[in-house]
Amino acid sequence: MSESGPELRDIHLPADPSWWPPAPGWWLLALLSLGLLVMAVVWMRRRLARRRWRQRVTSELDRIAAEYSATTDALRLSTEVSQLLRRASRLLDPAAPALRGAAWLDFLDSILGGDDFTKGVGRVLLEGPYQRAANVDADALLDLARRWLQRLLENRKVHV
């Protein structure tokens, strides 16, 4: 011992904490972030698929309209519009394309909420293919088909 007191050693600090493994809170935050990222990717993929589908359907309807304006073949117009609507209706109800006659027109009307198909211009989809010279109001039919497709896309039950 010395006159000033006992000789003391310097204080040793503990080692800095390791960065691995992280604390449980960081694991929870990482899992939550990963879950949110997966949900965002799924949402974006669905949105992009819906947008691509909408563009394909619109371009198909525009192609049908352009062909009609070039050929004025009413039979072909009514057939192609009907086929397009049948393909699109599969998204809402897989059994819908198999409907025939008035049941098919009733299904189309159920989407729009009117009677434009059963009693209006859309009736040509049922009768047109069996007539030699179909009398079709092409602009009204194409407008009706466009409104129906737009309503179909707005429906939340549709999964593209």
Image (tube, rainbow, N blue to C red):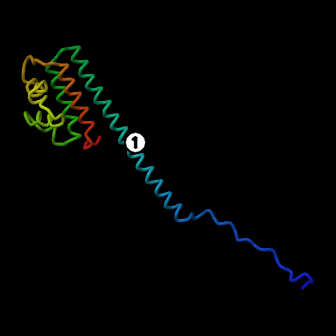
Above or below for 4 versus 42: below
Above-or-below relation of 122 to 8: above
- Left or right of 123? Residue 70 is right
Q: Position of residue 30 (x, y in %)?
A: 50, 57
Q: Give the vertical position of 131 relative to 112 (above or below).
A: above
Residue found at x 88% / y 83%: 5
Instruction: State the image coordinates of residue 17 (x, y, percent, origin top left).
Output: 65, 66
Residue at left offset 45%, top offset 49%: 37
- Residue 154, image x and y in percent? 27, 37
Residue located farthest toward the front when viewing the structure as drawn: 4
Q: Quarter of the image holding residue 85?
A: top left
Instruction: Point out the image quarter for the N terminus.
Output: bottom right
Residue sitting at x 50%, y 58%: 29
Quarter of the image that includes the C terminus = top left
Numbered disc 1: secondary structure: helix
The part of the image, by quadrant, that contains residue 48 is: top left
The residue at the point 42 percent across, 46 percent down is 40
**Viewer-side residue, 113 vs 127:** 113
Judged left or right of residue 153, residue 98 is left
Residue 146's image quarter? top left
Pointer 1 local density, CA inside 10 Å: few below 14, some 14–19, many at least 20:
few
Q: Is residue 25 above or below residue 52?
A: below
Q: Nearer the viewer, residue 150 or 127?
A: 150
Query: What type is the residue that disc 1 sits on?
Result: Met
- Mark 1 lies on residue: 44
41 left or right of 57 in image: right
